[in-house]
Image: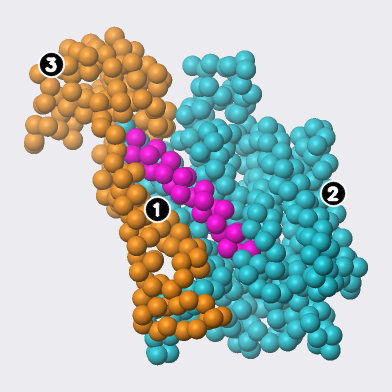
Chain colours: A cyan, B orange
Amino acid sequence: MEVVSSIRTPLITGGKSVADVSDDICRQVEGAPSRSWMLAIAVSSSFLIVGAYAVSVLLWEGIGVWGLNKTVGWAWDITNFVWWVGIGHAGTLISAILLLFRQKWRMGINRAAEAMTIFAVICAAMFPMFHMGRLWVGFYWALPLPNTFGSLWVNFNSPLLWDVFAISTYFAVSLVFWYIGLIPDFATIRDRAKNQISKNIYGVLSFGWMGGAKNWARYESVSLILAGIATPLVLSVHTIVSMDFATSVIPGWHTTIFPPYFVSGAIFSGFAMVLTLLIITRRVFHLEDYITVGHIELMNIIIIVTGSIVGIAYITEFFIAWYSQVPAEQYAFINRATGPYWWAYWTMMTCNVLSPQLFWIKKIRTNIAATFIMSIVINIGMWFERFVIIVTSLHRDYIPSSWAMFYPTRYDVGVYMFSFGFFFTAFLLFAKFFPVVNMAEVKSIIKGYSEK
Amino acid sequence: MEIDKYYTIGIYDDDEVVLNAVKKLRAEGIKIYEVFSPFAVHGLDIALGYKRTRLPIAAFLFGLTGTILALTMMTYMMGIDWPMIIGGKNFVALPPFIPVTFELTVLLSAFGMVGTFMVVADLKPFKKPRLFDLRCTHDKHVIAIDLAVNKFSKEEINKLFDETGASEIHDKNF
């Protein structure tokens, strides 16, 4: 039975029934991997292997293999870290904040976005760990554990330590949120499974879920509370990341605008990455009826909003640098726009401030090819944003005799490739073996929100 | 064989039909064992007369534990065990402790609540689910009625299943 409301835009097209939802989503889990999937995983795992070589050299030789020098002590590593954490903001934003706002369109995209979040946060966490050089003692340096340094504890006044707590909490809570959502869907796959092996595997993964009304009531309550606590968590994570910079006294970093500016930048790049992945996923797995052009348009609208906030933040920073009348601060910003890294600054401005404004035109924001290109442009821009903030603020510090430039080595590039290889390999494995759309949630809106 | 393992089940295609069926069956005085659905049907727990879950209270208490734990830990480490002068600041100052306090509150609240949920909902990796019908995780809603605890005969219950719009009626024994 299907009821189509004339006032609601359908969230699911193609006249799907409840049974069609599990058939369509489980098809790629149950079937043999497609040729395009095999090709994609071959490419991503070759990135992973090449990157693994760079990581091994890095761990063997130490971080001297990177292009860092005594003036620019932070460059690609922290840029990549902030970039990946930013990308990791979209998933929990979609599943938590949009759940609290009762935005039902989140249901088609939340599963894949959350998976992306988890993999992106792992990629982010790699970089500070690699930068510690001695990965294996990182636990003692980062966590408040009793130790042999004369019980010298970690410094709770330091934003870098807050980061440890913020990122690990964010990762753990996002993982739990994602997994709770997966349990009923694993049960669906378990009960459809034809062969014993997948029945057993999905049986273990589904934790013996039966779908009783009592458990559904508890499940709904757990989801709502998790959304409630994950919402401030999402906002806190990038706030704390921004404090790594904002609490320092480096010109260009020492600004109070950073927390909201970083959070909106994170949502901006996160949504762009969700779009990059979902535009491919919907095409490869034939999910056009679940991830519709309507979804893409709504995500593009969020991109205009957050992109414009980011643009205003860039201009505000400039204005405040002038208004403050602090020469060092003013120089830092003039140097960004006209100094040796002018090209990075103007790449950032073009990609992040100008290009998303094209989405005001409905034709562009509902065009899939245009959205796909834009989603990549935005993430290039957001990478340069972090590069500009970090490197241009450091490379010309207070003493002109120590001014320097940063030149990446192949190990900077290789470790970045490693994170890409990991991210796409993990996402492809997820897309093949896990349900990419939250079936249980989509089934609940089939009646009110589907197209006849 | 134990006698409480004899059930009669009614299979329904639609969530609204099953919701009305539950109301009707309960009005007749039939005790329902459980209703199994592929997705959360809103109002079904109320129709079945279930009490509101106390999981939010658990979440709050675990969160409170996190807050207290974080503040105690930091006060002990930075203020008592090894006080250090960092930037001339107080040994125990609240503002720099807030981020870690917040994160630990959220962490313990989430894990405590989800752990409690796993325990009360009896969800664990190697549990063998007692499924009344394989399609209840696909597209069907299943009302299961334990015959031993009801004074009604199987025929009477099945008749009500039929009247309330069940698409199939089966016996299920465990």
Q: Quadrant of residue A327?
A: bottom right
Q: Main secondary structure of the magenta part?
A: helix
Q: Mark on residue A102?
A: none
Viewer-nearest residue: A400 or A269? A400
- Secondary structure under tag 1 reads helix
Alpha-carbon span between mark 3 and mark 1: 45 Å
- Please state which amino acid type lies under the numbered disc 2: Leu
Q: Disc 1 marks which residue?
A: B110
Q: Residues within 10 Å of mark 2 (few under 14, many from 20)?
A: few
Q: Is residue A243 above or below residue A94?
A: below
Q: Disc 3 marks which residue?
A: B153
Kindly identify which chain the residue marked by label 3 belongs to: B
Question: Farthest residue in the top direction?
Answer: B163
In the displayed structure, does residue A106 sit left or right of residue A327?
Answer: left
Viewer-nearest residue: B100 or A13? B100
Q: Residues within 10 Å of mark 3 (few under 14, many from 20)?
A: few
Kindly identify which chain the residue marked by label 2 belongs to: A
Which residues fall within the magenta stretch?
A217-242
**Do the residues at discs 3 and 1 belong to one chain?**
yes
Alpha-carbon span between mark 2 and mark 3: 73 Å
Is residue A221 a member of the stretch shown in magenta?
A: yes
Give the mark, 3 or 1, whose residue is nearer the N terminus.
1
Tell me if I can see residue A55 in this picture.
Answer: yes
In the displayed structure, does residue A275 sit left or right of residue A337?
Answer: left
Kindly identify which chain the residue marked by label 1 belongs to: B
Viewer-nearest residue: B75 or A78? B75
